[in-house]
Amino acid sequence: MQRRDFLRATLAAPSLLAAAPRPNIVLIMADDMGYSDIGPYGSEIPTPNLDSLARNGLRFTQFYNTARCCPTRASLLTGLYPHQAGIGHMMVDNNRPGYRGDLNKTSVTIAEVLRSAGYRTAMCGKWHVTPQTADNHNWPLQRGFEKYFGTISGAGSFWDPSHLTRDNTPIKPDKKDFYYTDEIGTNAAQYIDELTGKGDPIFLYVAFTAPHWPMHAPEATIAKYKDRYKAGWDALRAERHARMKKLGVVKTKWELSPRDPEIPKWDDIPNKDWHIRRMAVYAAMIDHLDQNIGKIVAKLKAKNQLDNTLIFFLADNGGCAEGMAPRSGTDSNPNTSIRPVTTRDGRPVQVGNDPSVMPGAADTYQSYGPEWAHASNTPFRLYKHFVHEGGISSPLIIHWPKGVKTKNSITDQPGHLIDLMATCVDVAGAKYPAEYKGEKITPLEGKPLTPIFEGRQRPAHEAIYWEHEGNQAIRMANWKLVKRHGAEWELYDLENDRTELNNLAAKDHSRVQMMSAKWQAWADRSNVLPWQSWLPNQGAKKKKKKG
C-alpha cells in the first residue's frame, strides 16, 4: 500500500478511543522553553499543575518540534512539515513555495477540520503564521477558530503586547496590572466557560508566549527565585541532569553534553547579580505559565469536563540562545516594532542586554542568553534554530483520564508535531479532507499517537525530517543524521548517545549515504530548498563575485 493510501485508510477508521463520547481537546504550547525547564522533566522551578497532569497522564521523552517558532506553529496546526504549509522559515516572503512566510491554502488547520466535524473552536495566544502587517486573511478566525484573543506577531512586551487582537479587532491592554501570560490563561478559561456544556465538544488552542524574551515577570514572583541561581549554570545543569535520570526522562547511559565552548565557567564571569536576575525572571515566567495552566484545568473541573478532555502540553523549540542588541533603525517605529518605545505610562523602554539594567519590569527588554539556554536544554547540545537535540527536543505531556490507560507513564516512542493533527482527527472521529474550500489539500504527514495512549506500540515513521536555516537532520529508528549549515554530516546512535557526543559518520559511510539520500528525496517532495538558494542577496553576491 502506498504511503498516502495508508494514511487515508488509517484516518478513515477511528481507533477504539473514538467509540466513546468525543473528547474536548486542549492544545497548550510554551514558547522558547527547553526540555528540562518544567518539573516533570527535571526542573527546579515549581510547576505543580504540570506535575499533576504528568502524574495522572503520559510523558513522551522523544517528542520533536521544528526548532523555531513559526515553522513549529505551521506544522502543529496542519499536520504537515512546515515547508509544505509555506513556512520553512519566518514571516518573510522569499517567493518560494516552502518559504512564503504565510500559511498556505493547500493546508488545513486542526480548527478547520474539527469545526467541520462539529467542534466549537477557540484560541488564545501567539498566532505567528502570517505577516504581522498583512490583512486578516490568515488570522485565526479565517482559519477555523470561532473566538480569538492574542497576538498575531511573534513576540513583544508582556506588559504591553504588540498586535494584541480580539477576534479580528486590534485592541489595547485594558487594565493597569495587565500581564500577558495571565490574560491568556484568563481568556482561555473564559472560552471554556462559554463553549462547553452546549452539547458539542470543544477544541481550544492555547499558545503562551512565556518564556520567550523579553524577560518580563511580576516582581513578587521574581523575588521567589532571587537566590536560587547563585551557584550558576554549570551547577544547574548537573543538578537537573541528576534529577532527569532519576525521573526516567533521560537514560543514565546518555552523558551530559559538555559546556558549550562559547560559554564561560560561572566562576570566571563578571556581573553575576545580573546573570542571576535574568534566570530568576525566566523562572518566574515559567511559574506564571504553570499558574495559568492551572486556571484552564480548574475551569474544566468546574464544568465537569476534565475526565473527557484530551490535554496536550509541549514547547515550540529548545531554549533560546539569542542575544538582545540595543534598539536601532525601524525598531524605533512604534507602528512596526514588536518592542515598544515607551511603557504604557510613558517611560522609555531600555532595549538590550545591559548588565547595568536588571530585567523584569516594563521599561526593560532583554533575553536570558546562551548561558542559561544551555541549562534549559540539559542534557542536550545546541539551541533554538539548530536541529541537534537541544533545538528540537520538546517535553510532551498528555492528560486524558478517559483515554490514557496508565497514569504517570513514560514512553520512549518517538513522535513529531506532524502527529498532533492526526491524533486530533482520530479521537474526534473527524475526516481529514482531500479538498477544502476549492483547494486540493496536501495529504497528512503525521500518524496518530493514540495507540501509545492505549499502551501499545504504534507503527513508527520510516523517517522524521528537519530543515531550518540550512541546518538539516533525519531520524530513522534510533539513527540520526544531522548537520549544521555549511558543515559535514554527523551520525549518531540515539539509543546509546542521544546527547550526540560520539559522531559515527566516519565509521559508517554507507549509512550516511543512504540517510542523506533519503533526506534529499524528502526535501525534493516537500518544498525544501537549500538555504543558500533563496537567502536574500545571495544571488547578487555570487554574480558580483563572478564578474
Image (cartoon, rainbow, N blue to C red):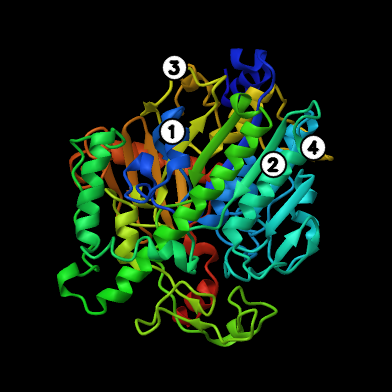
Instruction: Tell me where residue 475 sits by quadrant.
Output: top left
SS for tag 2?
loop
- How far is mark 2 from mark 3, CA to CA? 28 Å
- How far is mark 4 from mark 2, CA to CA? 11 Å
Report the side of 475 relative to 6 (left or right): left
Instruction: Tell me where residue 420 sits by quadrant.
Output: top right
**In the rendered image, which residue does mark 1 sit on?**
54
Instruction: Single out the mark in the foreground, 2 or 3.
Output: 3
Q: Residue at x 32, y 62 (%)?
A: 372
Amino acid under disc 2: Thr
**In the rendered image, which residue does mark 2 sit on?**
109
Q: Which mark is first along the chain, 1 or 3?
A: 1
Few, some or many residues within 10 Å of mark 3 (<14, 14–19, 20+): few
Few, some or many residues within 10 Å of mark 2 (<14, 14–19, 20+): many
Report the side of 204 relative to 395 (left or right): right
Q: Label for residue 455?
A: 3
Q: Position of residue 331 (x, y in %)?
A: 58, 82
